[in-house]
Amino acid sequence: MKDYLRSIIKQSLQQFDLSDNNIPEIQIEKPNQPEHGDAASNIAMNLASVLKMNPRKIAEQIVEGLKHDEQKIQSVEIAGPGFINFRYAENYLFDELADILNKGSTFGKSDSLKGKRILVEFVSANPTGPLTVGHGRNAVLGDTVANLLEWTGADVDREYYFNNAGRQMRKLGESVRARYLQELGHDTDLPEGGYEGEYIIDIAKGLVKEYGDSLVGSKEMITPFKGPAEKEIFDMIQATLKRMNIEMDRFFNEQEVYDDGSIDEIVKKLREKDLAYDKDGATWFRTTEFGKDQDTVLIKSTDEPTYRLPDIAYHANKLDRGYDQCIDVFGADHIDTYPDVLSGIEALGYDRSKVDVIVYQFVTLVKDGKPFKMSTRKANFVTLDELMDEVGADVTRFFFEMRDPNTHLEFDVGQAKEAGEKNPVFYLQYAHARIHSILRKVEQEYSFDIGDEPTLELLKHESETALIKSLLRFPEMIQSAAESREPHRLINYLEDLASAFTSFYHDCRILGEEKALIQARSALAKATAQVLANGLGILGISAPEKM
RNA sequence: GCGCCCGUAGCUCAACUGGAUAGAGCAACUCCCUUCUAAGGAGUAGGUUACAGGUUCGAGUCCUGUCGGGCGUACCA
């Protein structure tokens, strides 16, 4: 519909003496006030300065030259300083409602990104411990954005990047070894800065069970402990992700970019372009060339690369694999690292605009009205599994999705736990379940011929019209949520929709009405359930038919 | 010090990327269950959008400054 309005406005604009680059983008939006119609354009105001004319005057001329289909648009009005307000024709609403029912579980899908291959990289936690609440926001955002992009037609892969070689992993091995020795009665302390979590002890116990004390005298101090620990922890992480409805297409080990030589290759290329140089025994990247106030170390004087170098190599690797767009999801604490990565791939001749970043702010867990500070190494974190044990996977996903990624998120466990009133996720699921309950009853008590087309024209009540209009907004909401990478927009929309349905539910009965009306209203209810289910599906949340 | 993000109702947050009278949910108050799920609904109250300027037809949204909070600012990841 928006496209249609844009096209007829554009046509009408031809009467003005405008060159193409003088025409501002034609914006169509939904007015806040219902009296202002179903859609509005501010084009006349935007043209006022270009044409040096009174905006109302411009609006009048645009409307004059407008050729609109009466089947779609009922009225066009000029209001306020120069808004052009459109009101949809009833037939249009009914046609579109029928279209929703036809499309069913695919209603809302578009092909605006058809043919585009997109890689979403997220979670990417190193296997040093279970996923925590902080990773949860990352995981859910990444997965939901991936879902949204799939709904806009893109071919999306989900990837988890990790490294199992660094100092942290070494610490992990040492910590497991210490716990292992403790299990066997040796008097050993955890290493400085080691991992204190309970899961380390569990892993150590497993090793005792499997190997007895045969690892005590092992010359290899770390390997026999690190390997099994890594495997075990990855199993935990995968199980947690699965529980949250997340499935990765690939786990990418940082080691790959060492093994295939691309690290060395990149340093070589940067040197050739004089973007890398030696100083103080280290290799530096001239990030000052890219607007940073300092250069950055790529390879430490110990010959170990810093994490930036494999990061650059990894992104180059992604682009080499032919992705049109790579999206990274990470927390605000990593905000300073990605400009270097972008500079790196740009220096290597890649198009930096192909890498896009979703930065999310931290999560504060609130329990009993008090905030709860977390860190992985210290054992006082709350794992995602613990959180899901408390509130369930649906609520967990919902809470991580319901806020703008760019603002701090307060996760109130108490509120999330309350199954009813205070918990917004149930409002959506409840509306869905309610509809199915009604439809079940309709099926039981009435029998309709399958071929019967509902007479949608009977849907004349204010609440019915409002509900249909709300349903029709679904595709554009997906579009905007996908483009902006902001899943919370979809949630806001679904809450509006559920609320529109509830008004309908209160104003318009289904059971006990005339047969034709029952059919029409059932069709409307069914379409609503469908859109709710589609939306919840994108959010990775279940849509129960009974509650 | 510098960089990024944030500041909207008592609390947690929206506001369709600059549009018309800033909206929800909790919390408070008043009502509504012989009728398809009350996990619901109707209503009342609550605001100088941190502050001060600026840009323009129009600012919560953009620019500058101030204040307050978060995160960075490593030859850690």
Image: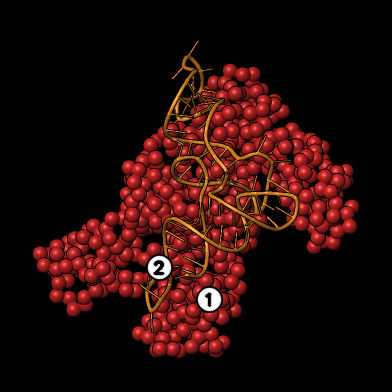
The vertical placement of B76 against A110, above or below, is below
Q: For residue A6, say whether it is visible.
A: no
Foreground pick, A76 / A508: A76
Q: How many marks?
A: 2
Q: Which chain is red?
A: A
The vertical placement of A140 against A465, above or below, is below
- Point 83% across, 42% down: residue: A68
Foreground pick, A529 / A479: A479
Q: Which chain is orange?
A: B
Q: What x and y, as percent, mark residue B13? A: 50, 47
**Where is the N terminus of chain A found, in terms of image quarters?**
top right
Label 1 environment density (alpha carbons within 10 Å; few <14, some 14–19, many ≥20): few
Q: Which chain is indicated by disc 2?
A: A
Which residue in the structure is indicated by mark 2? A162
In what element is the residue under mark 2? strand
Q: Is residue B19 left or right of residue A363?
A: right
Which residue in the structure is indicated by mark 1? A292
- Residue A155 is drawn in which quadrant? bottom right
In what element is the residue under mark 1? loop
**Where is the C terminus of chain A found, in terms of image quarters?**
top left
Q: Amino acid at mark 2?
A: Phe
Q: What x and y, as percent, mark residue A276? A: 50, 85
- Point 34% across, 74% down: residue: A166
